Image: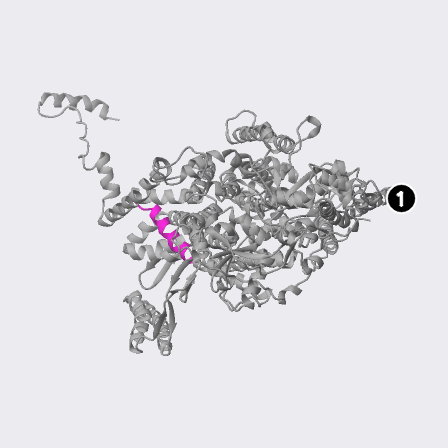
Amino acid sequence: MDTADTMPATARRAAEIAFVRAATEEPLPPPLTQSGAIGWIRENLFSTPLNIALTLVSIALIVWVMPPLIQYMFINAVWTGADRDACLVSIEHPVVGACWAFVRERFAYFIYGFYPISERWRVDAFLAMLVVGIVWLAWLRAPRRDIGAAYFFVVMPAVSYILLSGWPLIGLSKVETSFWGGLLVTVVVAAVGIVVSLPIGILLALGRRSQMPAVRLFSVIVIEFVRGVPLITVLFMASVMLPLFVPDTWSPDKLLRALVGVALFTSAYMAEVVRAGLQAIPKGQYEGAMAVGLGYWQMMRLIVLPQALRVTIPNIVNSYISLFKDTTLVFIVGIFDFLRTIEAARIDPKWATPTTSTTGYAFAAVFYFICCYLMSRYARNMEARLATGHKR
Amino acid sequence: MSAVGDHRPPRVSPLNDPRVRSIAYQVVLCAVILFLVWGAVDNAIDNLARARIASGFGFWNATAGFDISQTLIEYSTTSTYGRAFWVGLLNTLLVAAFGIVFATILGFMIGIMRLSRNFLVSRLAAGYVELIRNLPILLQLLFWYNAVLKALPELRDSILIPGGGFLNNRGLFLPQPVAEPGFDAVALAFVAGICGAVAYRIWARRRQQRTGAQAPVLMVALALVVGLPVVAFFAAGSPLEFVYPDRGRFNIRGGIEVLPEFVALLFGLVIYTAAFIAEAVRAGIMAVSHGQTEAAYSLGLRPGPALRLVVIPQAMRVIIPPLTNQYLNLTKNSSLAVAIGYPDLVQVFTGTVLNQTGQAVETVAITMAVYLTISLVTSLFMNWYNARIALVER
Amino acid sequence: MGDSVIMKRVFALTIVAAAAAFAATAASAQTLNTVKSRGVLHCGANGTLAGFGLPDAQGAWTGLDVDFCRALAAAIFNDPAKIKFVPLTAKDRFTALQSGDVDVLARNTTWTSSRDTQLGLNFTGVNYYDGQGFMVRKALKVNSALELNDAAICVQQGTTTELNLADYFRANKMKLKTVTFASANEAVKAYDAGRCDAYTTDASGLYAERLRTVKPDDHIVLPEIISKEPLGPSARHGDDQWFDIVKWTHYAMVIAEELNVTKANVDEMVKSDNPEIKRLLGSEGKHGEALGLTNDWAYRIIKHLGNYGEIFEKNVGQASALKISRGLNALWTKGGLQYAPPIR
């Protein structure tokens, strides 16, 4: 450019005239009312009369809800005590908030249910194995995630089954599922749903997109039937009708029946999630795979599914969130899951106080919220990560 | 290379022929399914016969003999199981209908709040959605029923609602309007108002197409639909009486009784579903690119018409499918009534009737068929609607 | 040649499969053999009703029905601990027995004709004569169930209780408002929270549930008993031997009480000269073998658990928190209804 030789000349001339600036002055910061905290507040909260009104209403709402909530949950809460007397209004506690003493006393019950005390280390071991598996699979930069998948979908279920229900040959006494309860059952139901629903869901989704009319019809019927009815009726069907449909010598275990119902239900929803992923794969990928001479299963395993599952990870995690919330429904067919143990403890006269119910529900809410929120954050991160790949 | 006309493909073993294979796979699948179904039916017949459980739908006309706490149609303990079924179904539809209306209103409000430029408002809405979506609906229902409604005062200390209602832990009691003779005129005026409004709108449309002049359709329509009945009401001499609820020895008699179970179920369903509807609404509005709004402005539309004529129709195309899905979810979730004792279809039919008759297969099958029918009808409607509003690409 | 080999194999396989299937069904009719080979008795119990069936926080079960099942296990295995209790709700108890989940149902279940015939149950006797009653708050100042016109009443769904309640109100031309719940727990909790004026269930249950209210002294049980509720254990239709075993387990305990054979003195009683005692405890006759058990079956029951009176007092009587008097459940010799056919 020609500015290169004119610039020094201009500068020289500017230097000769003293009242002309030689360099550009830095712009002043905007006035304090337009920038920084005040400006931000003005812009975001008080820009128009309507906005001012909305802001005031919101502040009123927050003031109305938050302080009493904090007082109830922490400041006025009772943290220690042996029975209901601790949480009744007394001279030391003129105002009684949440009765955390109740949760502390029943904590082991909420986690293990009636699982024999001497055997509870087995539950701890199971939970530890599960956490290892989840971290291995969810952390994308973990080493050897293929082994992780094998561990999560094959090794862990088998070992957990032996660990939890026992195998007298290796010295683990048998523990009937009627003794299982609390968090253990919730986690078992959710884990079985997670492990089983993905493969079955993939098969159903492939079936629904199959060229073979019988296979397609079968998949469509299963998927639409299950998605058309409430989970609770599927659970009723599994718990009341299933025993009639198998030879009476089998007599499937009560927990097993609920697991069958939950797995069936989640698989149908998973199938639709996977189908959406399959539809997102351009036709060229299929044609390319066929052109190199891959068979159907090779094509699916090597070309289509890896791409389809990758884009559906957020949706898969979202349906796991639904599954995790839906595990509470096994409550209704008489299985002692986490929520049911809280419900059972809540109505125990030993702890009957005006705040026991709310405390129990608050505890359950915190638990479910943390689990579901973590999953949804993970799904959102994955989404953001995947989105960058497609951005141009 | 070879003789002309010999275009036969090379001989392939039938085992490798894709068509033969496909037929073979399907035959195997059908055989496996038939075998499983046959085995299941066989086992069921065997098991039922051994247990001497009656089968068939003969129980439908037998006397039920139990009471139901909320009945929209005539029902007494001498009614039949069939009648109990209809009572349960209507109760399900009642809570679903109310739930859909309120969840839609609340959901749209929250969804629009989330897009607000006001930081506090959008954060509050986001907090609501995050909190509610991450808690199981069953937990929420139990909370509303056991922690909130049970905390209401007892009958003696009922909260008085202005206008003659009561609120206590037995439910909400409201004055019941009863039509007196002459009320027909009001109903007639209402119908006439609707007809008039529709006619006016058609006329206004035609005129606008002809001359371009616009008419205040909304205002005139409101005046017709609301104004006419009000005028008729006072002209006929206020022909409406209220039956006020009255405290009896145990309970409140008269008036409209709203069960606490119903209130809790409605609260739970509305609050839960609204969070999902809000997300659908937000996604729908964000899906309309800003260019559309700008284009509308550049054509000279004011913000109101731009929103009404350009943005909302396009947003609705994205919103409607997930919205219907949420309506279906709400209907299906209403079956959780069984946990708090609201007499919906599942509670009455797969609960009490199943127990009294012992006919598990029939009752569960009927219940599932009802929900399936609702789902299928809704999806058929959705397919029709989607086809109608689908983007016509040229 | 090759074809015929394949055909033979297929044929043989089919036969084996069919035989296995047949063997499986044939075995299922023999409940006693199933139980013996399994080594554990599956007993359907209540799980939430103090005095009849309730596990504590450590999973140790107590109750009248629970002890009945233990007696059955003792008669079969000489070990009352070889038992698995399956907690059942009122809703799923019958399907559990029908489907073979449990071998015997001892869950305070009322003996009715339709249950006996249509539901595939065989009631084996009455281990507790009960009747349906009402519990109300003292503050209501109600003295009779006939004053409950228009009252809201909490009840558990799917029970005879629910039907009796409707019948009683219809017969007395009273207006009824029921609020039904899936479990007794929820129904009592709702009553205690003020959702209803009264709670109704079997009188024995009322005393047990009263203990679960926040202030038991604030509630009274009304005098009216509006129904006959003979509660008893039941077995599946179609296995007469098993039916006999369950039936005579109860009778053995009643006979033991008649003869004053107790847990404490049973070892001395074995040496007794009384022919009735000798037949009961197996030192005379082969009455146990006729049942498919050992001859000392009744001795095992008494040795491990005691006679009917002892079990009653321990679980629901004066030695328990419920403090229910014997009433109709006294022996026939003491003005009650408990009566057992003789062993001979």
Q: How is the image coloured?
A: one colour
Q: Find out whether residue B113 is within the magenta segment.
A: yes
Q: Position of residue B187 (x, y in %)?
A: 37, 74
Q: Circle 1 sits on which residue?
A: C4
Q: Find out whether residue B40 is within the magenta segment.
A: no
Q: Is residue B358 visible?
A: yes
Question: What residue type is disc 1 on?
Answer: Ser
Question: Is residue B184 found left or right of A283 in the rendered image?
Answer: left
Residues A8 and B24: in front is B24
Dominant SS in magenta: helix
Q: Is residue C155 visible?
A: no
SS at circle 1: helix
Question: Is residue B307 found left or right of A245 in the rendered image?
Answer: left
Q: Quadrant of the C terminus of chain B?
A: bottom left
Q: Residues within 10 Å of mark 1 (few under 14, many from 20)?
A: few
- Residue sitting at x 70%, y 57%: C116
Question: Is residue A316 found left or right of C278 in the rendered image?
Answer: left
Q: Quadrant of the N terminus of chain B?
A: top right
**Marked residue chain, label 1:** C
- Where are the magenta residues, as a range? B100-118
Q: Position of residue C310 (x, y in %)?
A: 66, 43
- Check the image and name the residue furthest to the right: C1
Looking at the image, is B170 positioned above or below residue C23? below
